[in-house]
Amino acid sequence: MPYLTPARLSEAVKHLAQGCPRIVAGCTDYFPSQAQGQIPDTLLDISRVAELQGIMHVGDGWRIGAAVTWTDVIQANLPPAFDALKLAAREVGSVQIQNRATVAGNLCNASPAADGVPPLLALRAQVELSGPDGTRQIALGDFITDGRQIALGADELVSAVIIPEVSPNARSGFLKLGSRTHLVISIAMVAAVLEVDKDTIAQATVAVGSCSPVAQRLTALEQALAGQSVDALEDLSISEKMLSPLSPISDVRGSAGYRLDVVAELIRRTLRQAAGVF
Amino acid sequence: MDGPHTDQPVRFRLNGAEVSTPARTGERLSQTLRERLGARDVKIGCNAGDCGACTVLVDGQTACACLMTTQAAEGADVDTLTGLVSSDPHAKRLIESFQDHGAAQCGICTPGMMVSAVALLRETPEPDEDQIKQALGGVLCRCTGYRKIIDAVAGLRTNLDTDGSAGAAIRRVDGLNKVTGVEAFGDDIAQPGTLEILVIRSPYPRAAFAFGDMDAWLADQSGLEAILTAVDIPGENCFGVIPPFADQPVFAETETRFRGEAVAAIVGTPEAIFEFDPESFPVTWTELESVEDVRAARAQGARQLHATRANNLMCEGFVACGDPEAALAKAHVTAEGRFQSGFVEHAYIEPEAGFAQMNGDKVEIHACTQAPVMDLEAMEIILGWDRSRIRMIPTGVGGGFGAKLDISVQPYLALAAIKTGQPVRLTYSRSESMQSTTKRHPSDITLRVGATKEGKISGFAFHGAFNTGAYASWGPTVATRVPVHASGPYRITDYRAQADGVHTHCPPSGAFRGFGVPQSAIAQESLFDELAAALNMDGLEFRLLNALDNNVKTICGQTFSQGVGIKACLEALRPAWQAERAAAQAFNASQTGANRRGVGIASGWYGCGNTSLPNPSTIRAGVRHDGTIVLHQGAMDIGQGANTVIAQIFASALGVDTSRITLEGPDTDITPDAGKTSASRQTFVSGNAARLCGAALRAVILRHVNAAEDAALQSSAGLITVTDSAGTHTIKTDALEPGDLGYVFEAVDTYDPPTKPLDQNGQGEPYAQFGYTAQLAVVEIDEALGTTTPIKFVAAHDVGKAINPMLVEGQVHGGIAQGLGMALMEEYFPGRTENLHDYLIPTIGDVPPIETLIIEEPDAHGPYGAKGLGEHVLIPTAPALLNAISDASGVRMRSVPVTPSKLRAAIVERDHG
């Protein structure tokens, strides 16, 4: 039962090719999901891989290495478009969790309530996968295929999350609704990124989590927002059709009807937060 | 550093010292620290990152040690509380401030809290409240209500008293071990490598099962020493806290009655138990039809849980006086409603745990418990052994709140130690703790209540069905207590209340802070608000008009000539009631959005001690040869502070300072029975025994030198000096011959509160004393989202005499936090919320400031006038919150918890209904 801690990406990929180790980094999802007596043979801890460290501005965007923790995100110097991601980072479990848990791990765990997914969808994130044949990129929305399901080959690992270049005018917001203040799985959450030019919304992305097996972008709403004045956000009407990508379930945290009912209000509040109008 | 780590030691610095330790692949760092490196100050509460008790610093950053592999710590600096308190200036400061504020009650979360606080203070030496909440938000506490922790981290000043007599706010006498991580809880006793037990539990609410060839199976297993099943029980396979109702098997024999019920256990090496897959155990399950709610269980033809209890009715409680129907018929206004609540989990941060070993032909059981002598009595029956062969040695208790009154790990520990002849340990996982131990009873209550035009209560008709689950546990107590308390602390002359305990295929409901009274208070206090509104009366004045008083009959026909403090509580709240209502109105007038504030009020009362049954406490004390004054303190301290309060009372009666007292714990071989820590009885009942014992020991000492009764005592090493008007007498204790127990002077005394039986209408004298309370809650609701944010509490509590005002505040804060949880977020669903991320308890961010108003209406029976307090606090909290929500929104919520989903649905119905 080896515990593998490669220092280089090539070594990590080689280990993957040689077997089916369980890939771990912060382990904050790994341990809670471990059932009595269910012990994987091999753990591949990628948290020390050199190529997976750090948040960097690269050619045409931002690269968040797969070993980057939520605390790293909170402490990074990033443009305002990332404010939503930083707000979400502060909602991932507790400080203890944020110090260990990685952004990439949050995507791989693919919980319907993953705090990181809505802001990354709103940032149009791509997931970079590394395998024996090199690297490939896939849109986040295509990477998480269903609740707890991801499009990751057995010989691949997530090496980075790539955010395409963001406008310096882009502003963002994030709201999470839960039944208590800290350490809470969300009932619903919304992330929005707005490009605002002289009080007019040039472009908007809005994503909603915990209201479908995988967080969803609301593209019809995004189209409707383009060209609107930020002052109009106060009374923004959100149609049923705009929410049609959502398919909430009823569970111990809230009913499906409740989720659909409050998500429109959360969207309005998140957009106002992003636009800086209250 | 590529390459397999198997069998390779992991190196890091632990508390500044280089360590090299073996670790299994992917072993949790918490496990390595505790079991390989002796760092038992790292506490395990959930193994899922939900509670934060195991928080350590890794390279200066907080981490849950349960969510880190040991290998990930390679090369790192790992600091635990033990290291920090010896070297870090912030930790040294926190040691003092946590004790000064009473910020550690049971102490199980304290290491996590203090380590998190050190990380914060290093970055932010003078944090504000929000920064403290953010930094400590990942550590759950179930005892303190967090406010004292916030104050301690902020370093607020306190005004502690210096002398330790009854009435003095002093640090708890056992506090230092809690804030340094030294306190040993249930999982901290066993040596590393001790054989472990794993219990095999039913995956279904009701199931038949059959074992395969277990001998053959066991022979194939490596590292497993034994299997335990019902056939291994030498005595009776039956236990229960109330002997006539004892009905619960240690191991089910043919059919299980709830999900999580034990059928067998295996005993093996730590490695074998770690690797054991429960699916491999030779048992086949057949799921059977079950009934899981009270209405289904009472329906004709419903599956019967116990042959001797027809219609699944375990028992009924009943109190009646006057003619409630006639009074309701002539009432000017009436209000009625159906009120419901679900299972509430105690959620102490310490799961049940213990250790046992054989000592000759005697079995010694170390376990966290609220009732060591009741545990001993249960084990006598299960083992069929004489009690002289069983010794219960309670460990530190990381929270109890009622559920650690019932046995849990104890029989498995004893049976395994007996069968293997070796030391054994057992610690429940969080999920098996939640599955298998008792819960607060779900309730389904209907109440009709009327009032005259003048506002006097006219008729009260109550029926409550309580889901007592698969086994009786404390269900009979709930059924008895509810009708006796459902009136609230009010004068009601025409009253009828019935409570039914109903069996279902759910976990056993048992004792939880208030024994059903918090549920009934929701119904009563909600409808009192409705009556006041219907009469256009102020809610506080309406309650005052109906409040009990000295020389007024209770609904049981009991009259107290003194000590009835509810009016004083309500009057103490009046200024806050008026100010907060005005402030809420002003707030609402200024709002354009969805937020609304409201203020609610509710009262409560609670009888201290057993209901019309004997419940004596015995306290022994002595002076050793070397002059040490020893108090055998058998009243289990589960964090509430009995060690301190009982010592303060004893020291006052003896006439010495509390700091002179040395405690012996509630080990059943050396300390007499001070009864269970339950029914808010320890300060009152054991306190009285301590007072009598202190006075008796004083008399023995004075008699030795023929000193006057008002003589002053002083003790020092080997000496007691007695000073009266005739002069100073010096007693050289080392010159005296010790008796059989090793004491040169000794005394023992017993107190049993005077009560009288209840007749068939519940008339009698159920308790020698009641404690009283009234609380006010301010909430802010967000009508668009349905969320409720408590803003403030003001809590008036008549405690007769606050033996230790700091500990009184601690109980008030903790009880309110639990009441808040019950009101707003907590509901246990078997099979669905068996962890602390799906079952939510309040975090540090959820409990607002609490102002405690201590009312001292002395009780003639109480030691120095003191009354019990622990359970009282929780009773008015939920109804005060519901009344505040109604004040804010106009919506009356009749089912708790009031989740955002439920409140929003009610608001939508208000607007469109």
Image (spheres, coloured by chain):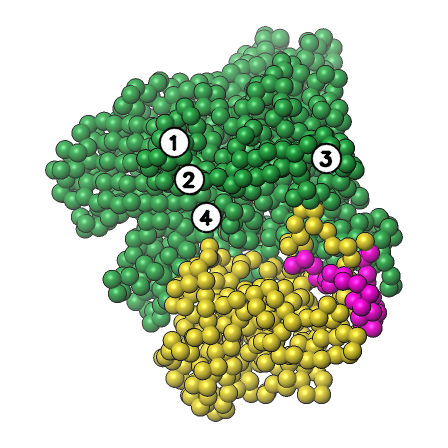
Q: What stretch is highlighted in magenta?
A: A2-30
Q: Position of residue B22 (x, y in %)?
A: 84, 48
Q: Position of residue B416 (x, y in %)?
A: 69, 28
Say which amino acid is labelled 2.
Answer: Val
To which residue does mark 3 refer?
A: B217
To which residue does mark 1 refer?
A: B312
For disc 4, the neighbor class at 10 Å (few under 14, some 14 to 19, many from 20) is many
To which residue does mark 4 refer?
A: B827
Question: Which chain is disc 2 placed on?
Answer: B
Going from the N terminus, do you reach mark 1 or mark 3 first? 3
Question: Which chain is disc 3 placed on?
Answer: B
Q: Can residue A246 be seen in this view?
A: yes
Marks 2 and 1 close (CB-CB < 8 Å) = yes
Q: Which chain is yellow?
A: A
Provide the secondary structure element on which disc 3 rests. Answer: helix
Q: Between tags 2 and 3, which lies in front?
A: 3
For disc 2, the neighbor class at 10 Å (few under 14, some 14 to 19, many from 20) is many
Q: Looking at the rendering, which quadrant does residue B748 occupy? A: top right
